[in-house]
Amino acid sequence: MGIKTKKVVLLTGASTGLGLSIAKKLLKEDFFLVLTSRGSSLGRFGENGISASDKVWIRELDVTNNDQRVDLILEINQRLGGVDILINNAGFTFRSVLEHVQEEERIQQMNTNFRGPMELIRLVLPLMRGKRSGQIINISSVGGMMAMPTMSIYSASKWALEGATESLWYEVKPWNINVTLIQPGFINSDSFMHVRNTKKSSLSQRGKDTYQNHYLNMASFVEKLMKLSPSNADDVANKTVKIIKMKRPPLRAAGTIDAHIFSLIRRILPRRLYHFILYYTLPGIRTWGKK
């Protein structure tokens, strides 16, 4: 505990994309950072000018690996006195209709986007409760409040994250532990290129298949929206730092402009009308089911 002089922030998935943007913003603040990524991505920290120092640890962490989770939190507890701020950012997206998802893929998606973050929260909470302070920030998505076709298990993982986080907000409030979900919408980036396909969805997109038009139209639609989005990863990173500095952070916070709009539409429109409008505005919907 002797080397701890600042609040300790643990950030997962910190070597690329949004996680990297958050890391760079936090480096300018007065925190002790524990930045993590999978082993295959650790080299990206150096490529982006981030290295270990007297205020930065860089550690390997696959959030689905229980031994790595336990070992890292134990090290932080013993040497730094525990995690003060946990930011669960690590995650990925499978593009697939529900029928093209096999059980091992479903488990992989849920383990990364939901079960891994839940286990990290469980591990850091005892010391947070002991200190009667702490903060947990889970990076969710508009996919956690509105589901889209070809994104069923991704949305399922984010809806699970949102539901558990809402329960957690009530559970730990008596110990002065703040809990927030940040919901980014479409971010202007090339992250659409890193969306994974399941085995069956990959085969469907390469050949004639019942769902081929689903994939073709939704993929181009998402790419277009991301390229047109006025929001970028730095905007969400700035929002994250702002949430950290708040005395009374909200349970939910929109990370991008469109996330505000989607949330408003979801709240205002009657549910039946909402689904009717959404369905008939899907790209190329009249061609779906024609094969």
Image: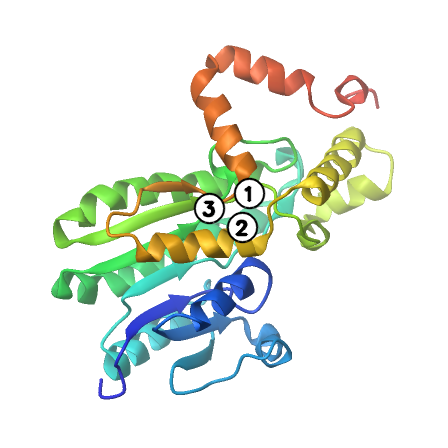
The answer for how far apart the CA atoms under marks 2 and 1 are is 7 Å
Which callout, 3 or 1, points at the residue further toward the start of the chain?
3
Residue positioned 51% across, 64% down in the render: 13
In this picture, residue 32 sits left or right of residue 202 = left
> From where the camera sits, is residue 112 visible?
no
Residue positioned 28% across, 64% down in the render: 123
Disc 3 marks which amino acid?
Ser
In this picture, residue 94 sits left or right of residue 210 = left
The answer for how far apart the CA atoms under marks 3 and 1 are is 11 Å
Between 142 and 158, which is closer to the camera in this rendering?
A: 142
Quarter holding residue 230:
top right
Badge 2 marks a residue whose secondary structure is: helix
> From where the camera sits, is residue 219 visible?
yes
For label 2, the crowd category at 10 Å Cα-Cα, with few meaning under 14, some 14 to 19 and many 20 or more, is many
Between 191 and 259, which is closer to the camera in this rendering?
A: 259
In this picture, residue 148 sits left or right of residue 9 = right
Disc 1 marks which amino acid?
Tyr
> Residue 11 appears at what percent x and percent y?
43, 66
Badge 3 marks a residue whose secondary structure is: loop
The mark closer to the camera, 2 or 1, is: 1
Instruction: Using the image, tell me which numbered label, if any, was put on residue 87.
Output: none
CB within 8 Å, label 3 to label 1: no
Residue positioned 46% across, 62% down in the render: 64
CB within 8 Å, label 2 to label 1: yes
Residue 137 to residue 155: above or below: below
Disc 2 marks which amino acid?
Gln
Residue located beneath label 1 in the image? 154
The answer for how far apart the CA atoms under marks 2 and 3 are is 14 Å
Residue 59 to residue 23: above or below: below
Residue 267 to residue 208: above or below: above
Residue located beneath label 3 in the image? 140
Residue located beneath label 2 in the image? 109
